[in-house]
Image (cartoon, coloured by chain):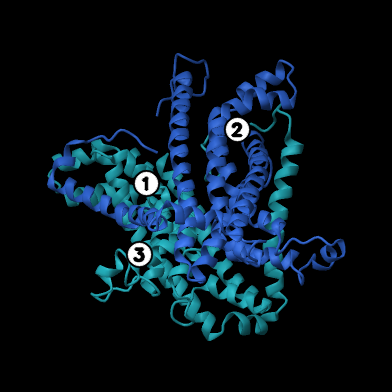
Chain colours: A cyan, B blue
Amino acid sequence: MNKNPPTSIPTRRARQRTVLPGFGLSAAITSLMIVGLVVIPLAVLILRAASLGPAGFLAAAWTPRARAAYAVSLGASLAAAIISSLLGLLVAWVLVRLEFPGRRILDALVDVPLALPTAVAGLVYSTLYVEKGWLGQILVPVGIKGAYSRLGIVLVLVFVSLPFAIRVVQPVIESLDKDTEEAARLLGASKAQTFLRVVLPGILPAVVTGFALALARALGEYGSVVFISGNMPFKTEIAPVLIVSRLEEFAYAEATAIAVVLLGMSLSMLIVVNVLQQRLARNAQ
Amino acid sequence: MTSKPRDAATATSPLGLLLITGAVATVGLLIVAPLASVFVDAFSNGPRAWWEALAHDPDTRHAIWLSLTVAPIAVLINTIFGVAAAWLVARFRFPGRSLLVSLFDVPFSVSPVVAGLALVLIFGRQGLLGPTLAWLAVKVIFAWPGLVLATTFVTLPLVVRELIPVMEAIGPEEEMAAVSLGANGWQVFWRVTLPNIRWALLHGVVLANARAMGEFGAVYVVSGHIAGATDTMPLRVEKLFQEYRTPASMAVASVLAALALLTLVAKVFIERQLETESKELEAARAPGADTDPTTGGLGP
């Protein structure tokens, strides 16, 4: 059962041999792409970083400016993933459980961040939240700076990660057994108790998976953040921005070392997501 | 993605109204307001200024042309890869299969900037293949082949991820029947497989195209952002913004945003087709309607 990949629907047909043709050709195309475009480039990146030696790697990847960039990246991504998970749960719940005019439009709009180029999102967010912007003229006077600040980074990261948090939770809410909730209510549980004791345990794995996906997406994001953050070292500079600025100074060793740290963070998120999804699939069965 | 809501009653309760307000405010503030402001800002000086910003700037024109070239090439490569990889994974069992499937997802979790850097380390002037490429006088980094490679990398999972679940749900019976009746591999693919997966394939292609047109980080690193040469539309948006030409930047952004909206409309339409087809498949598989012994009488 564990051998089923996360994207597959479990089938009862465990077929070892098949008469179907095309194994050789499809295997050749697939391995050419995966090895050539994914495995070799990432291996070269890691080998380049490894060739610096432990001391050289630390000197390149663990400078005060780099440490500050990891902290901003991690902090902003964590904050954005938490906000996305909570808002995502709310939106997913409303989309599944409540009927109201415009529900289908709302459902379609949730996918906008997946289709809208991140550069457009960054540009628009920064113009919305500057002093003269639509939202900035209300928020800046009361001391909320949404542009060229850490808050701005969190805002765009919530934008890019929100669909992931919603779309993972939505089908799980759809599959919840409503009879159990009704039974809980009939036995005298309050709405809050029903939600916390009956509903939440069922959807928590999905919420956590959505959180991990949102975090992974936020950690690597570059296009939108570069517009809104102001990119000030030690303050609003995230790790991907630091990689690019090192690269533009032709400091390849340093860029590579920082990239490997970031890659390590992302790949560990991927492993967490895979484990969670397998657990989720087991629970659903 | 949508299903019939099961309790419409609470929509009118105070709690229901509060939840709906919260969800609408979330989507409104985070998604609708930015989207609306792209178009308002782009047309704030009238449609004439908008058109001039797009058509009368040779660098912008070149960026539009470059995006319209690079994205389809990357999408085409990923369509071929996606079909081949889905066929491999959904129709055959072999050692390392689940490792391969997890590798499909790697580009999603790698920062596009890191992906771009990895390509520079291979194809760049000081990269692994740098001397060879220089000898061949082929330019990959700071040229369009690099843009294609970077765009292909970031969109790699999109088509294959759409196809695998659909092909596994359909199962290999029809294809095996075709083979036993004497069809060759290509005939099976064009006549049986492709008609069955066409909507899922189109779904993946539409999503991959949207991502390809909008990719920024990976492309930024490999392009060297040379105006009029290697700037794609998203890179042009950034350059115009840096040059304090926000209205022109908004004009380019509005074209990209319109494309994103078009993508979503297509997506909703395709998803409806997919839903209909999966219902038909379920109906055909229902006990009594089919003789499949593995599903008959074993309801959930």
Res. A261 visible in picture: yes
Residue at 26% across / 40% down in the picture?
A97
Q: Earlier in the sequence, mark 3 or mark 1?
A: 1
Residue at 49% across / 52% down in the picture?
B51
Residue at 51% across / 58% down in the picture?
B53
Q: Is residue A192 left or right of residue B233?
A: left
Residue type, numbered disc 3: Leu
Residue for badge 2 = A14
Chain to which the residue tagged by mark 1 belongs? A
Looking at the rendered image, the quarter that the C terminus of chain A falls into is: top left
Residue for badge 3 = A128
Q: Is residue B268 left or right of residue A178?
A: right
What's the CA distance linking mark 3 and mark 2? 54 Å
- Give coordinates of residue B74: x percent, y percent: 65, 48
Chain to which the residue tagged by mark 2 belongs? A
Say the numbered circle drawn on residue A185: none
Q: Earlier in the sequence, mark 2 or mark 1?
A: 2
Residue for badge 1 = A109
What's the CA distance linking mark 3 and mark 1? 19 Å
Closer to viewer: mark 3 or mark 1: 3
- Say if A157 sits above or below B195 in the image: below
What's the CA distance linking mark 2 and mark 1? 39 Å
Badge 1 element: helix
Badge 3 element: helix
Badge 2 element: loop
Residue type, numbered disc 1: Leu
Residue type, numbered disc 2: Ala
- Give coordinates of residue A263: x percent, y percent: 58, 66
> Mark 3 and mark 2, same subunit?
yes
